[in-house]
Image (tube, grey):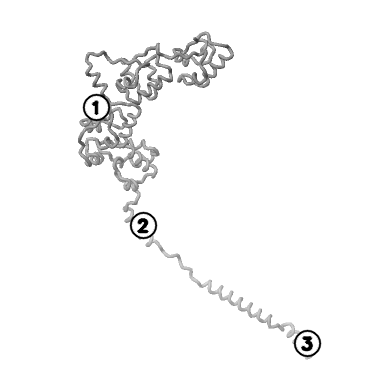
Amino acid sequence: MRMEKPFRQLFKEYFNFSRKDRNAVIILGVLIGLVFIAHFVVDHIEIKTPNDFSGFEQALEKWEGQNSDIPEFYSLFEFNPNTVSKEKLDSLSIPSFVKRNLLSYRAAGGQFEKPSDVRKLYGMNDSIFSLIEPFIAIPEKNAPSVVKKEQADPVIISGTFDPNEANAEELLRFGFDRFQVSNLLKYREKGGDFSRPEDLMKIYGIDSAIFALVKPHILIREKPEEIALEEENSSPPLLIELNSADSLQLICLKGVGPVFASRILKYRELLGGYYSVSQLMEVYGFPEETFLSIKENIFTDTMKVEKIRINFVDFPGLLRHPYLNKVHVEAILNYRQKNGPFISNDQVLKAGLIDTATFVNLLPYLTCR
């Protein structure tokens, strides 16, 4: 009994827990129990297979098939590039910058005669054109088109007009579009003249269709000087000397209006006179066809050509000549200052002061006196 008491006391002391220790033991026991129960439950849970969506997927495919026939806002459809409206063009499946270029081209008076003309638009490439080419529909010229109807409906053309005098408003009233009117007025501003109705065909943008429409209404009034020449039946053929003619005489020449007459006189003053009728081709903007039509009616008096006194002329006087530039003038004056007066005109070329082509043009104007 003596041995038993100490052992019990020892056991009691060994297993004697504080309140804090007892709480920890209780919590640990609960956790162990929960793990055991969870392990048992998980082993008996039946994992179900995923939901079967095959029926829903079939229904979705059927709905998409029914709606595939609904056209998108942007699509391809048959259109005439000459008449399609901006609104319809916006629905066409092509880049926006190509649409803008098409409208700008039409606004400037451009027309598409065949589908391949659309390929020439700025920004149009082969891939875009191959996509829309089957949808381009341009009626033939002999078929009634929307454009012709729009031009023919507004006003019945009556009266006459002179293409040498009519203003922009009058020309528009007779059926010309703004692009054609602009080109016609620019031609007149450059000195162009219309002596017969067919001359209108020379204007860029005026084709046989518009010419046939306006031809019955063209009335080109004869100039007073032309009437006077016609009345002088006994007078010799018209001959004009370029170095003494004034503007009134020059405009008597076929195709020479007030603008070209003024340019001819100004260039004559810069040159010091014409030594050859071919120098008219050097006048700014002067048409070759006009020169060919009047060359039999003009001549030059070379005695009236003003000479350049190369041993006395100063820098400004030499530089004003159209055949010389600043490099030429400085070379001539520096040579003269270092070597004294020129003895002959050929000395200018032999000294390498100007090139051969310039010397040949300038020679009729040079003198060493």
Secondary structure beneath dot 2 equals helix
Label drawn at residue 6: 3
Q: Amino acid at mark 1?
A: Arg
Q: Amino acid at mark 3?
A: Pro
* Viewer-nearest of discs 2 and 1: 1
Q: Residues within 10 Å of mark 1 (few under 14, many from 20)?
A: some
The residue positioned 26% from the left and 40% from the top of the image is: 147
**Image quadrant assignment for residue 182:** top left
Ranked by sequence position, the earlier of labels 2 and 3 is 3
Looking at the picture, how far across and down is residue 188, in whole percent? 32, 29
Q: Residues within 10 Å of mark 2 (few under 14, many from 20)?
A: few
Q: Which residue is mark 2?
A: 61
Q: Residues within 10 Å of mark 3 (few under 14, many from 20)?
A: few
Q: Which residue is mark 1?
A: 221
Left or right, residue 30 beside residue 119: right
**Image quadrant assignment for residue 361:** top left
